């Protein structure tokens, strides 16, 4: 029987390990070996007696034996006891610091290695789960202590001169009646749980807040914790009606090559307690809430049993809670389960159920791994001259006649070191800049990893030769066109030097040198002022009146040339408006009379004067008296000085014409 039991136990452990490792994504450093297993660690905390009338004076049903084991009375035989052994046991006199330092603090270092960790508080309602996780201002719990130490670690590891730059973000959510609600943004509604191609569980749309100090954490966490759903029952005045999950992410970026990235996630989970509705007296909404809580905890027990038995299907998707805990149970996280139990005899059945679940969870095997990736940084594009991009034979053919006529050989350059040799990829100058930049980055990366003699692309030889030949032909064609352009420019310069008079009669097909071309400036459009027809007719009828409406005069305009030392000047015709002083004075007097004697309706006949401004003018005139000059309009609210010029131009000619 012992051999059969041993074989079954080994088979269960192997199946659990395989199911846990199937979702793991190994880092590049450990791609050749499986991650080492890490069993779920279980700690049991026994809370003290609660002051009350029920069960007062009864002896406790649970007793601790040592720091790892305890015993509970056997309900089938009162003369026997059931013994349990866990990773840690904390009695009634244990403090918050003892639980945190003994079970939670050691796993924080794994986050700086790019691994995941989770802490779950499990137990019946009223057993002290929320006190263990949150605590009080006098006795802070696991969550504030873990965040304080984690932020201190990130500041030390991410300081100046350290190889890694670290950043911390937090998210806070609750699972209420199978709905995932964002406590940092309650208006976001029900969120969905997804799984990416690497097997990582994520929640799209979940709010993430960056935190750099414990004060930042308190500023976001305290208002969000008040959004969690709680309710009063017979056993607890502030009973948690939902599962609360605090997610803390630690992102690491390497400052130097090869620029690795790591991401570690910490789940701090306060589960809602299982409830017996006969003792809690739940009705209506409380009964519906307890049904959803018990259902999700029942699925959690099924997941643990399936992992221990090595079943091919683990029912993670049967509940939102188990879907979110997929990494924590049988996944890739260092998991700590803190089972909270009560000492009173009236909680005996709940205590036995919690201890049995904790004993089964202790057999679950996880396989944590480092979540690491390599981020290639984009290198600056290499700027090379045309001679460096061309081969020696092409550079010799591309030399200009002037360079060949000099004939003074340059001294040979010093041989370059092996690190300064140009890669064959740098000859591909005609390719797309983005593609060339990526190829050069890959070439430099291969060179930095010590791969000597492999600077070329890993392509077949025939295709590579065809590509190189095509690139050389394009380079030669470009150089040929440049040489032809230089010959044409030199021919034009020689012809102008021989006969400057034939410059204007040269062939229209002959190209002028680029340096001798001038930039022509477009002529501005001529503007004319449209006058009232009545005024123009009266000017024609009375030739004695010297009123010139439009006057034509000349104006000089400068032309800039690229090769000329002094700009050329050219006369240009333009038009300007001139009005006689008599007409101008008459129009201003007409406007002034209208401002002093006209009604609001008469004032609206003026251009740029609407109903609002007309009422302002009438009101100002009643308060301050008549206007002494037209410029007094600037004192009226709503009429600025900038509007006076346009106002006079628009009205003075029309009023003068109507007066005539």
Image (cartoon, rainbow, N blue to C red):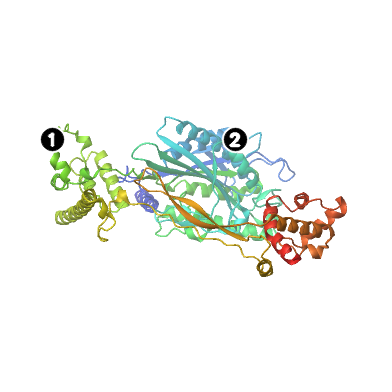
Observer-nearest of 397 and 641: 641
Q: Which mark is residue 280?
A: none
For disc 2, the marked residue is 96
Where residue 310 sits in the image (x, y, percent)? 40, 55
Image position of 159 (left or right of 622): left
> Mark 1 to mark 2: distance in Å?
85 Å
Image position of 524 (left or right of 408): right
Where residue 120 sits in the image (x, y, percent)? 53, 46
User: Which of pointers 1 and 2 lies earlier in the amino acid sequence?
Assistant: 2
Label 1 close to label 2 by CB (< 8 Å): no
Q: Which image quadrant for residue 653?
A: bottom right
For this orientation, the residue located farthest to the front is 544
How dense is the environment of label 2, judged by Cα within 10 Å: few (below 14), some, or many (20 and up)? some
For this orientation, the residue located farthest to the top is 161
Numbered circles on residues, count:
2
SS at mark 2? helix
For disc 1, the marked residue is 409
Q: Which image quadrant for residue 410?
A: top left
Q: Of discs 1 and 2, which sits in the foreground?
A: 1
| Residue at x 73%, y 43% (from the top left corner) | 52
Image position of 76 (left or right of 197): right
SS at mark 1? loop
| Residue at x 34%, y 49% (from the top left corner) | 3
Q: For the C terminus, give its image quadrant.
A: bottom right
């Amino acid at each position: 029987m012992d051999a059969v039991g041993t074989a079954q136990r080994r088979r269960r452990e192997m199946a659990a390990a395989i199911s846990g490792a199937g979702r793991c994504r190994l880092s590049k450093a450990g791609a050749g070996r499986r991650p080492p297993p890490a069993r779920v660690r279980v700690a049991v905390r026994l809370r003290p007696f609660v002051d009350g009338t029920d069960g007062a004076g009864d002896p406790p049903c649970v007793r601790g034996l040592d720091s790892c084991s305890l015993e509970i009375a056997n309900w089938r035989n009162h003369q026997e006891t059931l013994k349990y052994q866990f990773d840690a046991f904390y009695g009634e006199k244990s403090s918050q610091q003892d639980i945190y330092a003994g079970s939670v603090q050691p796993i924080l270092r794994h986050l700086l290695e790019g691994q995941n960790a989770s802490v779950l508080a499990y137990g019946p309602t009223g057993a002290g789960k929320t006190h263990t996780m949150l605590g009080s201002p006098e006795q802070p719990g696991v969550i504030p202590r873990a965040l304080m130490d984690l932020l201190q670690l990130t500041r030390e590891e991410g300081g100046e001169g350290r190889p890694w730059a670290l950043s911390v973000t937090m998210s806070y959510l609750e699972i209420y009646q199978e709905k995932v609600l964002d406590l940092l943004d309650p208006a976001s509604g029900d969120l969905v749980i997804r799984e990416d191609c690497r097997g990582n569980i994520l929640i799209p749309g979940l709010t993430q807040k960056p935190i750099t100090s414990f004060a930042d954490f308190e500023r976001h966490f305290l208002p969000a914790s008040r959004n969690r759903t709680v309710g009063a029952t017979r056993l607890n005045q502030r009973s948690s009606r939902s599962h609360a999950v605090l997610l803390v992410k630690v992102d690491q970026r390497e400052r130097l090559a090869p620029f690795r990235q790591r991401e570690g996630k910490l789940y701090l989970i306060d589960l809602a307690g299982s409830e017996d509705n006969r003792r809690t007296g739940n009705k209506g909404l409380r009964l519906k809430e307890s049904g959803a809580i018990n259902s999700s905890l029942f699925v959690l027990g099924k997941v643990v049993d399936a992992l221990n038995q090595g079943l091919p299907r683990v029912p993670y998707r049967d509940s939102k809670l188990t879907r979110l805990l997929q990494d924590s149970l049988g996944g890739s996280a260092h998991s700590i389960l803190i089972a909270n139990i009560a000492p009173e005899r009236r909680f005996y059945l709940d205590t036995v159920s919690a201890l049995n679940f904790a004993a089964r969870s202790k057999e679950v095997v996880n396989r944590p791994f480092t979540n690491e990736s390599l981020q290639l940084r984009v290198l600056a594009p290499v700027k090379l001259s045309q001679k460096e991009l061309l081969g020696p034979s092409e550079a010799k053919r591309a030399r200009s006649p002037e360079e060949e006529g000099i004939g003074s050989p340059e001294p040979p350059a010093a041989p370059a070191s092996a690190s300064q040799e140009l890669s064959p990829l740098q000859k591909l100058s005609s390719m797309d800049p983005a593609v060339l930049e990526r190829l050069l980055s890959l070439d430099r990366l291969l060179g930095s990893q010590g791969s000597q003699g492999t600077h070329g692309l890993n392509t077949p030889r025939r295709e590579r030769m065809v590509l190189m030949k095509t690139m050389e032909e394009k380079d030669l064609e470009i150089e040929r066109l440049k040489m032809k352009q230089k010959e044409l420019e030199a021919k034009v310069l020689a012809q102008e030097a021989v006969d400057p008079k034939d410059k204007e009669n040269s062939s229209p097909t002959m190209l002028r040198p680029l340096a001798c071309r001038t930039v022509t400036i477009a002529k501005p459009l001529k503007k004319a002022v449209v006058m009232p027809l009545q005024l123009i007719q009266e000017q024609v009828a009375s030739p004695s009146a010297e009123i010139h409406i439009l006057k034509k005069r000349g104006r000089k305009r400068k032309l800039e040339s690229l090769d000329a030392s002094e700009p050329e000047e050219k006369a240009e015709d333009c038009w300007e408006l001139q009005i006689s002083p008599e007409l101008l004075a008459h129009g201003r007097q007409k406007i002034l009379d209208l401002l002093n004697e006209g009604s609001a309706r008469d004032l609206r006949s003026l251009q740029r004067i609407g109903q609002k401004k007309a009422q302002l003018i009438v009101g100002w005139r009643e308060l301050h008296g008549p206007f002494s000059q037209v410029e007094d309009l600037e004192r009226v609210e709503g009429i600025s000085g900038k509007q006076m010029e346009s106002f006079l131009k628009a009205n003075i000619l029309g009023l003068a014409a109507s007066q005539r």
